[in-house]
Amino acid sequence: MQNDRRKKFSTLFSLAAFVLLALSAPAAHATSTGLSDLSLAAYWAPVWYQDTDSTNYKADYISRFNYDGDWRGNNNWENLGSYNVLGEVYYAVIETQSHFFIVYADFHPRDWSESCAFFNCHENDMEGVMLAIRKNGTTYGAFHAMFTVAHTDFWSYKDYQSTLSNAVTNDHESIDGDVQFYQSTHPYVYVEAKGHGDYGAERWETNGFPGGDGVIYYYGTPEQPSSGNDRVVGYGLRSMNELWNRRTDYVDTFASYGTFRGDTYEDNSANSPWGWDDSNDGSVLRGDLYMKPAYLAEYYHNGWGTMSQTYIYSSDGAAR
């Protein structure tokens, strides 16, 4: 049965970018090339290997912030048992003269442990991935590098099998591993259980999940996993604008700029992409991965060739 579902998703996955491109409206949310931001995000959409813990499988499922039907941040922990948790990931596209930067953010209602009295737990949890895509005259560009967010650290990955990507080298930060892809354009991303940090070179597709159980999300129709050991689950893409447009809602959704409101265990301890921060990356500031991705990329690494920091489009409309 799993093999049949995988074959079905493989076919749908191959057609997804084409269908979205064909159906996309050409105006409102389009890059300078005319390609819609959703089509671009779908073409490069990661495959998410979500490790799960049998103590509470559902607390490790990926979903959207308002999975419970409201925009309150301080009831997401409590509502987890009462609502479906469909697979959904937020995305944003930021374009410079030389690159597309695609940000994907995976949300979980809980950052948890079996013993929250002894370990750090908090309501809401958002980690993520940023892809640097070189504009090269083709429709979707070429993969250049990937950055992941794991708590208060950013991790860098390149494709050693690509001449373009392999040219990226260490500078202020080191390359942390080799990206592998599903169907050549969908990088594997590995999400830890409980704390949900994102990494890019764990090789669980080859070595298996830690402990044996886990969920694999492929871009498609949003689904809730049938269990904590479901290997073919669909997830949808949601515009980051849903959160960005609420960034000054300091009553329900946010406690402060870039920080979600939450009051279970540690208060207000989860961040949106414009609040992500690496604790020791020099002059790169909080939120720069989202607001100034070209600067972060060029500061972290050498070997980019031309890397423009002139922003010409962003799906959220923010000035950069």
Image: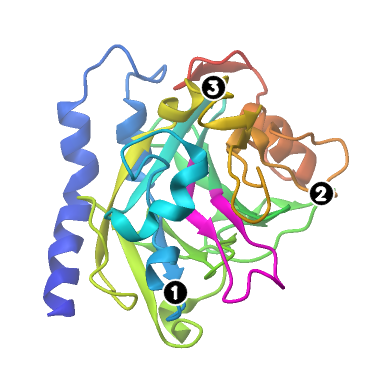
User: Residue at 45% across / 79% down in the picture?
Assistant: 55
Position of 146 relative to 180 (above/below): above
Which amino acid type is shown beneath numbered disc 1? Thr
Which amino acid type is shown beneath numbered disc 3? Asp
Q: Is residue 111 magenta?
A: yes
Asked if labels 3 and 1 touch by Cβ distance under 8 angstroms, the answer is no
Q: Quadrant of residue 97?
A: top right
Residue in the foreground of this view, choosing between 49 and 187: 49
- Which residue is labeled 2 in the image? 279
Residue 292 location (% of width, % of height) = 67, 28
Colour pattern:
rainbow
Asked if labels 1 and 2 touch by Cβ distance under 8 angstroms, the answer is no
Q: Is residue 115 magenta?
A: yes
Which amino acid type is shown beneath numbered disc 2? Ser
Q: Nearer the viewer, mark 2 or mark 1?
A: 1
Q: Earlier in the sequence, mark 2 or mark 3?
A: 3
Q: Which residues are magenta?
A: 103-128
Q: CA distance from mark 2 to mark 3?
A: 26 Å
Q: Tag 3: Cα neighbours inside 10 Å, few (<14), some, or many (≥20)?
A: some
Residue in the foreground of this view, choosing between 151 and 295: 151
Q: Secondary structure at mark 2?
A: loop
Q: Nearer the viewer, mark 1 or mark 3?
A: 3
- Which residue is labeled 3 in the image? 249
